Amino acid sequence: MIQRIQLEQRYHQQAMQLFSIPLCRHAFFRFGAPVLLALIVLAGLHHASPFSTTNEALVKSLPYILLPVAVFLGELFNQSRTSLAAILLLFSYHIIQTWLQSPLSIPFTKLAYTVLAVALPLNLLMIHRLPERRLMTRSNVFFLGAVLVQFIGAVFLVNLLASFDLTLIWQQYLISFPLISRLPVVIILLFIAVLTIHAMLVFKRNHPHDHALFIGTLFSALTLTFFHYSMISSVAYSVLSLLLLTNLISCSHELAYIDQLTGIPGRRSLDTEIKHLGRTYSIAMLDIDHFKVFNDTYGHNTGDDVLRLVASILAKQSNNAKVYRYGGEEFTIIFKGRTQNDSLRFLEQIRKQIEAYPLKVQDHPKGEHSMDADIASTNITVSIGVSDNHKMDNPYSVLKAADKALYRAKSNGRNQVCQRLHA
């Protein structure tokens, strides 16, 4: 039999409150900061005096330096989609600097500008469909090869069409308002549509590459929409390069300090926090009872759901305490400014809440996925040990004392809270 846990709607609501709201706030920061910087770049270029020759050369060279660094860091931190976005943006920047420096009144330049404005956002959007693997895997190499084929085809097409009079097409189908932008309105709408998709993905799931693709599309749209601004491409691409690097570094920090399964801080965060606890504090160690048996009975996916559930209850009812996943089925709770006696009431509430929580388990015969499978209820319990720093100077000694209290709680029959016995 293959068992699969089905958590009740109340848990999903708790999980949404626990994870989605902070995630949306974080996503809003990731969404709002690039938009604000884009507006600052646009306003600055609108009112700025011309760059000196030295500064202009420096700004023009920055994307050539920063984007390869983003490619390298993306590969180093296993963020291949961000690396692909950086490669694509570097290629587009090179096209702008090489082919689009002559006036747009020249047919070849205008066609190349238009084709780039169509191809770039669509290719950035396609990166979402690629798996998050190493850069030189088959799917990523195929994508880069497809981009190269597009480039060769675009060169041929632009050279071919440049010899024709396309005035009627520009006037009837590719209408633009030169006082605002040289880009046709329909392509501006394309950029808006793609940006909307990226923004929705940032708010919905907020993966590292979602942010990278959003800022890449945003600043390339800024560049091509306001192409008549002097130095727009160099300044915009320099800013987006810095944002890509910042995103990579911040995401690598999150991967190091946040437990990916439960979404709460992990062991490394605990090791950092435990060095700054103040004069009075208590530490609790929590362990899910018979978790190995539960895991073996219902499967690892079910066990993962249980870990997420316990993490959500702990974080939602933290009562100003800080919760960490210590490892496996163990969690650590830190109470600053509280003795173990002050913490007991809260820990007992947590124990009772977890014990009373009904888990709906649905059984499926092996190889079948019937909607009429039997559903049974089960419960989990936790054992908790707590210690404060009374007559103890080393926080790791307090942690060890809490672990001993936890062991005593399990030895005494589990599903209870035990505190350190003061000498």
Image (tube, rainbow, N blue to C red):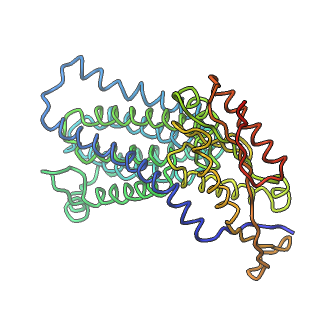
Q: Looking at the image, can residue 79 be seen?
A: no
Tell me if 254 is positioned left or right of 229 in this view.
right
In this rendered view, identify the residue nearer to me: 199 or 117: 199
In this rendered view, identify the residue nearer to me: 328 or 232: 328
Q: Looking at the image, can residue 343 be seen?
A: yes
Which residue does the image show at 51% across and 55% down from the upper left? 205
- Residue found at the very far top of the displayed protein: 54
Placement of 258 over or under 301, stated as above or below: above
- Where residue 154 appears, as percent x and y from the top left, is 41, 48
- Where residue 279 appears, as percent x and y from the top left, is 52, 27
Residue 173 appears in which quarter of the rendering? bottom left
Tell me if 58 is positioned left or right of 81 in this view.
left
- Where residue 17 appears, as percent x and y from the top left, is 50, 60
Placement of 235 over or under 308, stated as above or below: above
In this rendered view, identify the residue nearer to me: 182 or 134: 134
Which residue does the image show at 43% across and 47% down from the upper left? 26
- Where residue 248 appears, as percent x and y from the top left, is 49, 35
The quadrant in which the C terminus is found is top right
The quadrant in which the N terminus is found is bottom right
